[in-house]
Image: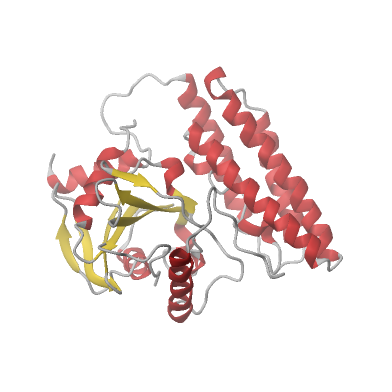
Amino acid sequence: MRSPQRKPWRVNHVRNLAAGLALAALLGACSSGAAKPSQPEDEFLDRMEAVCRDTRRKVDKLSASDTTAMRGLIDTVNAGLDKLNALKPPTKLAKNFDDFTTNIGEQLTEIGNLDKAVKANDSAAGQVSIDKINTLQLAADHSVGELGAVRCVGLTPPDGLAPPISPSTPPASAGTPSTDTQASATTATAASSTSDTTAAANPVYAADLSISSKPPSGYKWLTIAPVDVSGLYTKETVGPLVTYYASGQAELLADSKVYANIYRVQISKEWTPAAIADYQFWEGVNGGVDAVTPSGTPVKQKIGAFANTDCAVFTAGTSGITVCTSTGVDGLAIIDAFVEAQPAQG
């Protein structure tokens, strides 16, 4: 079960069909209506994301427990990079695309340095490389977020698949977590360790939701530290299906004491009852009740999913959204506001 992360809470149209269609649009699926003429940017991004998706599938088969993992990572990502470099981006997308591919090349160089440091048992040099890799990854995710190529977020794994050498937490994109944030993260880690005893040996960090999504109307995104979601990937049914998981924290503009933690997931197949049960357990709403948002979106909600925290989960097609709020804050309305804030696609 995932525990809430970051800052502690302070105060902190056919109905069901409409809900599914809204989420499909949110995550880039096209509607079944009349096809629209493809734009050059759309065609390019489709090809780019196809390369990223294929590369990620191969990367996900690598394990830090294998002494050849970093070399395999370099070869796999380099092959993907060659395919990306063969693409010709439209002028409008060229700068962000070039920033992304240059960044991936720099990551590969640094992963090579990390591989050498590990083989030489040089933990100090290895840590320097890990920090550089994780910083580059955040910049890469920002570039693909600007492009709108969500499936290219997190193309390379945190820490460059290095075996444990006491790595530091990857840096946040800006600012330093407050003492309250650090305390909350420590509590969350302890709780997660209790409920997810088979956590992955190599950390997996959630993508930054603020890069790929707009905040709900009336809210703003806060800068947060990366969230370790390794436990989700160990879930027997849903874990192998997850292709994208992102987290973000939104603050109410009218009241800075009110926050909402928002999570998005994409899986490779349609939801099954077993996968939904796995995912709902991870998000803390197992044992909750069926509810609907003001717009009619069906969700599973649990009051007190975590200490002083309520959560609601919506799953449809191959996608899911979770919103967790301080007890008493209307998280169901925030789900609607988050979906409505995303630009229509397809």
Quarter occupied by the C terminus:
top left
Picture coordinates of residue 16 (x, y %)? 17, 49
Q: Relative to 114, does residue 47 appear above or below in the rendering?
A: above
Quarter occupied by the N terminus:
bottom left
Picture coordinates of residue 71 (x, y %)? 77, 55
Residue 319 shows up from this direction:
no
Count every numbered label the image shows and give the total. 0
Picture coordinates of residue 181 (x, y %)? 45, 64
328 left or right of 274 in image: left
- Judging depth in this view, the residue of 170 and 230 nearest the camera is 170
Q: Which quadrant holds residue 311? A: bottom left
Q: Which quadrant holds residue 105? A: top right
173 left or right of 106 in image: left
Q: Residue shown at 16%/53% (left/top)?
A: 293
**Residue positioned most to the right:** 120
Q: Residue shown at 49%/61% (left/top)?
A: 227
Q: Relative to 180, does residue 73 appear above or below in the rendering?
A: above
Q: Relative to 231, does residue 265 appear above or below in the rendering?
A: above
Residue 118 shows up from this direction:
yes
- The colour mode here is secondary structure
- Judging depth in this view, the residue of 76 and 326 nearest the camera is 326
Picture coordinates of residue 33 (x, y %)? 25, 28
88 left or right of 5 in image: right
- Judging depth in this view, the residue of 203 and 324 nearest the camera is 324
